[in-house]
Image: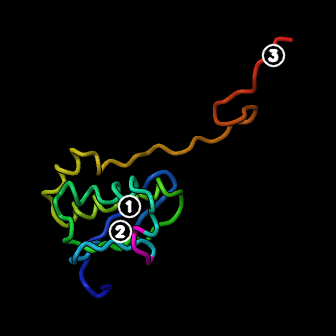
Amino acid sequence: MDEQAYVWGTGKRKCAIARVRLFTGDGKIIVNGKPYQEVFPRLLHRQLIEAPSRVTETTGKYDTIVKIGGGGLSGQAAAIQHGIARALVKQNELFKSLLRQEGLLTRDARVKERKKYGLKRARKAPQYTKR
């Protein structure tokens, strides 16, 4: 598979970074050397990953190989979705408007806010006591 021509896309979400390669094939999605069903047991995560190919009606046309690191399962699933969407746009420029309409090309920039000193979490303050 590696000797074939492919298109690639990088997807990011929270702390997760996905490097996605798209090959012509029969729709297999491999994440870190395993089928994506093993890596993502939850249906919601699988639907996120399948969304770009469902929107562009390319389900079963491309094999996808993903290398992912960082973050948790939800962040990783969203990063893979972002990467697949970007790779599909490189494959065919006509997909751009479809994917943009669904919001799949927009990088979700929300990340965890840092904890501040004097507070319990990023914004939660200790309880105020009058006496």
- The N terminus, quarter of image: bottom left
Residues under labels 3 and 2: Cα distance?
53 Å
The answer to whether 66 appears left or right of 125 in the picture is left
- Residue 28 pos. (x, y %): 30, 74
Residues under labels 2 and 1: Cα distance?
7 Å
Identified at 17% across, 50% down, the residue is 98
Judged from the image, the secondary structure of the residue bearing numbered disc 2 is strand
Identified at 37% across, 74% down, the residue is 30
The type of residue carrying mark 2 is Val
The type of residue carrying mark 1 is Ile
| Residue beneath disc 1 | 80
Range of residues picked out in magenta: 33-37
130 and 10: which one is in front? 130
The type of residue carrying mark 3 is Thr
Circles 3 and 2: CB distance less than 8 Å? Answer: no
Residue most toward the top?
A: 130
In the rendered view, how is the structure colored?
rainbow
